[in-house]
Image (spheres, rainbow, N blue to C red):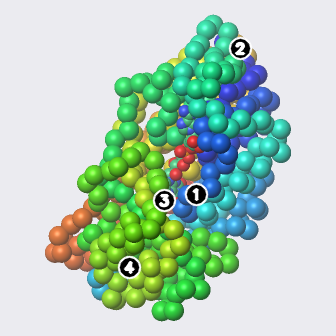
Amino acid sequence: MSQPKTAIIIGGGIAGPAVALSLTRVGVQCTVYELQDGPATIGGAINLTPNALRFLDYVGILEYALKLGCPTEVIEIFSVASGKKLGDLPFGSKERHGYSSLRIGRTSLQKILLDAVRDAGVEIHYSKKLVRVEEDEDSITAVFEDGTSAAGDVLLGCDGIHSAVRKSYVEPTRQPSYTGISSAYGIAPTSAITHPIHFSAAAMNSSRNGSLLTVYCDAEKTTIYVAAVMEVSEHQGEDGWRIKGKVAEETRGSLLRRFDTTKLPCLEEMTSATEDLFFYPVFTLSKGGLWHRGRALLIGDASHAMPPGGHSVGLAFEDAVLIARLVEHVKPNNIHDVFPRFVELRAPRVDQDYAEAEQRWEGVRTVSWWWQMLREYVYWIAIGFIARHVDKSYGYDIFKLEL
Ligand SMILES: Cc1cc2nc3c(=O)[nH]c(=O)nc-3n(C[C@H](O)[C@H](O)[C@H](O)COP(=O)(O)OP(=O)(O)OC[C@H]3O[C@@H](n4cnc5c(N)ncnc54)[C@H](O)[C@@H]3O)c2cc1C
């Protein structure tokens, strides 16, 4: 394989546009193919860690993100039962990591990325569902459901946890599994809250029935993202969906019962004021697995979807930077070494974050009353452990990794 000149990118979510931006910068002509008929119009608010902001800065769009999101340096942890604060979890500091974290609407982030991709001259084709991948000595071809196809020197599978590139080509046996945990979320207007708000930017309200995340998600703090993360044994689908009418009211009622809000009354108002509710069953991929085959490489959730609470968007952005650095750095005749080298360099970093995200994830499972009491008593120890990992992880700089 000679130095790639063209790349087919499958998926126009978050990793896809990021890879298109970084590969374009090193002279690879990219084209993005997305299953949906346009940019996403629904989605909650995601936390971008310092690693993610470092990437946005690199591709020149950080200033737009900062205008739309709410900077977060700590998540305050509260007990739902007592209303008391259990501690502060550091979440990225400008001083220590160069950037804070930023909570931003998923659709806002995607729009900023897609605008930048268009400005970079990259074509995005919508309503293109990849069904098959074919490869020969000279090129790789994506075959779409509508009967069309596209060929390039390399193909990047940025098509998320249920990746068709992985399932149809790279590793069909590696299937996502349901974690037993789902998220119900919505966005509430701050103006609807009459009781005092107990956090300054973000709070994780811990109960024995799961956690309720409440966090401002715009620069002016006019909206609050409310997300319950809880054990739900059955799931009814793979993708998230909007809950409407009677079902939405029942879900709201069940959230209020799960999270007794008598000690923190603003939580009830926030839950009741969410304009629309969405439900999202959380799936993960097992650790490890194959990340590439021939001219195809998986990026982002397609290769390493881990329990939320880590910093998966930051990891997807790091993937994007590393693949572009390797393509630029490698000698023209050694390009076949790029994908294996990518995996070799990325796996330790991803595995470590996966293990940490997995541990944190256990904290949202339903526990007995006395176990929750004990947990609240020793929370400060857990916060100390997490803070140490967070500090190391957010300080990681993919631009400085030795190739
Ligand atoms: C409840 C929840 C909360 C989260 N919160 C955070 C957070 O706060 N911070 C954080 O960093 N991460 C968070 N994550 C993780 C984060 O959302 C993912 O890591 C991130 O979206 C991965 O980006 P991606 O581009 O790899 O995949 P996706 O965002 O899933 O994008 C994949 C794209 O590929 C398209 N596609 C799929 N199949 C095909 C096909 N066959 N052909 C063509 N296109 C296709 C899809 O339509 C989609 O646009 C959260 C995840 C969940 C589930």
Which of the two labelled residues, at mark 2 and mark 3, occupies the earlier sequence position? 2
Q: Nearer the viewer, mark 4 or mark 1?
A: 1
Identified at 66% across, 22% down, the residue is 148
Q: Position of residue 221 (x, y in %)?
A: 63, 78
Which residue is situated farthest in the bottom direction here? 195
Which of the two labelled residues, at mark 4 and mark 1, occupies the earlier sequence position? 1
Which of the two labelled residues, at mark 1 and mark 2, occupies the earlier sequence position? 2
Which of the two labelled residues, at mark 3 and mark 1, occupies the earlier sequence position? 1
The residue under label 2 is: 2
Q: Quadrant of residue 191?
A: bottom right
Identified at 40% across, 88% down, the residue is 265
State the mark number for residue 242: 3
State the mark number for residue 78: 4
Quarter of the image with the C terminus is top right
Mark 4: give few (<14), some (14-19) or many (20+) Cα within 10 Å.
many
Question: Is the CB of the residue bearing disc 1 within 8 angstroms of ligand 1?
Answer: no
The residue under label 1 is: 42
Identified at 56% across, 50% down, the residue is 313
Amino acid at the residue labelled 3? Arg
